[in-house]
Image (tube, helix red, strand yellow):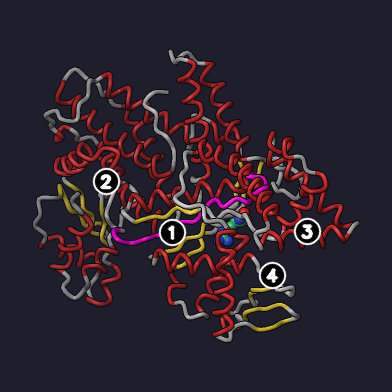
Amino acid sequence: MFDYRDYIAKILKENLPDLEENELKNMIEIPPNSEMGDYAFPTFSLAKVLRKNPALIAKEIKEKIKSDKFSKIEVKGPYLNFFLDQKIFAKEVLETLLKEGADYGKSDLGEGKKVVVEFSSPNIAKPFHIGHIRTTIIGNAINNIYRFLGYDVIADNHLGDYGTQFGMLITGMKHWGDEEIIKKDPIPELLKLYVKVNKAAKEKPELADEARMWFTKLENKDEEAVRLWEFFVKESMKEFQRVYELLDIKFDTYLGESFFSDKMEDVVNELEDKNLLIESQGASIVELEEYDLPPAMILKSDGSTLYATRDLATAIYRHKVYDFYKNIYVVGSEQNLYFRQLFAVLDKMGKDWAKDCVHVPFGMVNLKEGRLSTREGKVVFLEDVLNKAKEGIKEVMLSKDRGLTESEIEELSAQIGVGAVIFQELFNDRIKDYTFDWEKTLSFEGETGPYVQYTHARIASLLEKGDFETDLDFDFSLLDLDIERDILNLIYRYPESIFDAHEKYQPYFITRHIVEIAKTFNSYYNSVPINVEDDKLKNARLALCYAAKSTIKSGLKLLGIKAPDRM
Ligand code: ARG
């Protein structure tokens, strides 16, 4: 589509030859309201250099501009305000949207660049709880956004499927476990077992010895140890997959920690060869003083490896196999220090690609009833949250007679309920902690998922009623209302939100943008008749509605939310 920022920067450059075009482009602003134009160029920062008063600079530039793209250019104080010619603008935007539909915003920006997006990564035999909701949903949105921008993305689930806790679990299994009981309700049963064996080991230290023995056996691929470990993995994965299905999330790889168990020796050797391993109280560490960080522990005093050892092997493996442009970890901010240490060790090892590793942290999620954690024994399963959302919506759907069949209601409730949870998760800056609020999340009013989905469905029915087709003979010059221009601007600027979301790893740029489109559309719908008698006018207005619908749909899809045509 025509790039107005570029165009304005070019025009400005002709009149301000001493400035870089790019610099000019970055100076262009979007005025706070459309009465001040669609783009504004501030001149006060030029006043010093040009030794002229800003209003005069603006006036002189204005007089020299000759372009048919603007209906008017206005000098307002130290600003040059550009008003787009609405006829031309509408035609440009709507022709693009009629052609691209919900693919609008797609680009080849990332062509040829591989990006690993690691997210979700739950722990085997541990609850997939509401604390994991953030990495799973934010990570998936980033995954979608990067793909949409043409990057070659590898969505990886770095399962927590390795570590000494598996020795404990096998020990518990040997003493009290019953595979049949576990199969009926795997994770809660495995968790019970884990708690029990840990408690028992406090009184009977020989249980801890037994656990160490089992873990060593597991490392040495002992048949029974591996069989039980595989059983834990299989049963846990069944539960995780149910959640991924509800969320419609797919991974390219599930290279959990265990995958790297045989790749750690090389890392330890490399650290040794580079003289980076230092002995400290029996353990092996890497000093990170020069990075202002505490040392990273690589081997425990008994020689066993750690989470960090596996992460080093993981990063090195990813670099070797993918030669990534970016290696992104979507993991909570409680691991901020850990990732800084990890990347520092890689840097110290001389990996110049350490700078391409990115930790994308996020704050905590609280339920209104208080903090959620496994330790307090108050586990809130993610699956239950999603199902509860679905049930909540179903109740609303059943209370209104919309002429939907039972199975339609079932499917829609899932799409809206799950969508509501995703939407609220992606509405704010991810760094902030937030409180999960059922009432707000599931509401059809306000800045919520159901509201945006409902707007989308409302437009779909409007288009159907008006027998809209994308290949009619349109006269877009009929779209001369201010509110129509506002909608056009929101649609036109949508790709900028995708770009910002990708650059800052902040999906909320998209969430907020589509809410804004929904709100503006609804006030249009409430104040302007759309399916009018006059066919020409009707079709032009419907085309605008179609464009708004396509943009909303595109945005919802990037966030991982369905956009049903009926609700
Ligand atoms: N399994 C870990 C957890 O649930 C998260 C893994 C994060 N990824 C990583 N490469 N360290 O806390």
Q: Residue 338 at what x, y percent from top left?
A: 61, 67
Whole-percent x and y of residue 527?
Answer: 32, 27
For marks 1 and 3, give the one nearer the viewer: 3
Q: Which residue is label 3 attached to?
A: 211
- The residue closer to the viewer here, 304 or 13, is 304
Res 116 label? 1
Among numbered discs 1 and 4, the one appearing first in the sequence: 1
Q: Earlier in the sequence, mark 1 or mark 3?
A: 1
Q: Residue at position x 39%, y 67% from top?
A: 323
Tell me the distance, in whole angstroms, between the alpha carbons under discs 2 and 3. 61 Å
- Label 1, label 4: how many angstroms apart (C-alpha)? 28 Å
Q: Amino acid at mark 4?
A: Ser
Provide the residue span drawn in magenta: 111-129
Q: Which residue is mark 2?
A: 492
* Mark 2 or 3, nearer chain start: 3
* Quarter residue 185 falls in: top right
Left or right of residue 89, residue 453 in this image: right
